[in-house]
Amino acid sequence: MKKILSFLVRVGISAGILIFLFRRIDLERIIGVLAGINKPVLILASLLILSAYIIGFFRWKILLEGVDLNLSRSLILRSFCIGFFSNLFFPSTIGGDLCRSADLSLLSSKPRQVVASVVLDRLSGYAALAVVAFGALLLGYRLVTETAVFFALGVIAVLLAGILMILFNNFIFSKVSKFLSLFGRAGEALSSLHCEIYKFREKKKIISKSLLYSLIIQLTIPFSFYLLSLALATKISLVYFFIFVPIIATISALPVSIGGLGLREASSMFFFTTVGMSAEIAVTISLLSFFIIFLLGIAGGVIYVFAFSSRRLQRD
């Protein structure tokens, strides 16, 4: 019952935010803009988003090899697909990470190593997100006048620094582990997970590849948003997308809505309207990106469903 209530609350939050936004924008204008959308540019943006997820798959495969899990691409792809699909319905990307971790753990019988690879997969993406956002800010800081942008990037930097110190600094983790010991088996599981992650300090080549793939992803997504704005006949400086989109992605990952729906649109409207974009265009770009991701997630679910029965058959 608690899970059902939690799900309904998050659905209500997403719906409430969207209703709030739609009451403050011109829906007829949105319909008119969508009617005249540049379809070739829209397709190009969709392909870029797809390519980002394909690169994400290979990034995870590299990290799995780093924990000595040399599984076939087909097995990894199926688990990757269920995680991608689950992100559409869970309150944040953590839900999808849990699903792919659980699914691949059943196949590999090495749950600790699988979870370690997923944590590092998410962490490398977050680190690249921060690098792209701060790099864009250095190039275009004169264009940014909204203090909320600097505050949001500051929060991202503090969170990233804190996570890195806890995971890769033994002294700090020793202090944290004392607190974790209060949670019994759960604390022991987290400590053993930390050991698997800490081993990657010696695997610089794998970490470097993972960060390179993450940088490509974090450069691709903002550029796809830029293309969506061009498809809607709206043009603002490209640098804004590289600053704002990472912040929007971080906000939409908060576990208070379903798949970030509502949070993504509200934050898009807030940040992009500060640089001259209309509220209608900002919300439309956000909804278009969500629709593209939704279609790709459904495709991932279909791939997993077709592979599900064959994976669960016992040899005997």
Image (cartoon, rainbow, N blue to C red):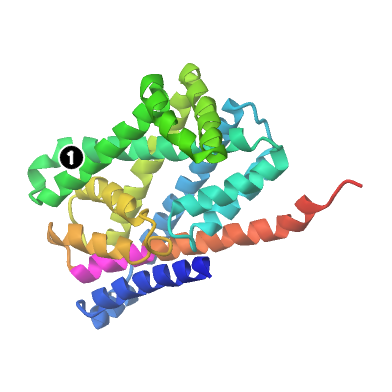
Kindly identify the residue that appears in the image at 60 percent across and 28 percent down.
65
Kindly identify the residue that appears in the image at 60 percent across and 35 percent down.
112
State the image coordinates of residue 255 (x, y, percent, origin top left): 39, 57
Q: Nearer the viewer, residue 110 or 177?
A: 177
State the image coordinates of residue 284 (x, y, percent, origin top left): 30, 68
Q: Nearer the viewer, residue 230 or 27?
A: 27
Bounds of the magenta span? 279-288
> Which quadrant of the figure has residue 124?
top left
Q: Secondary structure at mark 1?
A: helix
Kindly identify the residue that appears in the image at 46 percent across and 31 percent down.
210
> Which quadrant of the figure has residue 153?
top left
Residue underneath mark 1: 137
Magenta stretch encompasses residue 286 = yes
Horizontal side, residue 235 vs residue 111: left or right = left
Kindly identify the residue that appears in the image at 20 percent across and 40 percent down.
154
User: What secondary structure do most residues of the magenta stretch adopt?
Assistant: helix
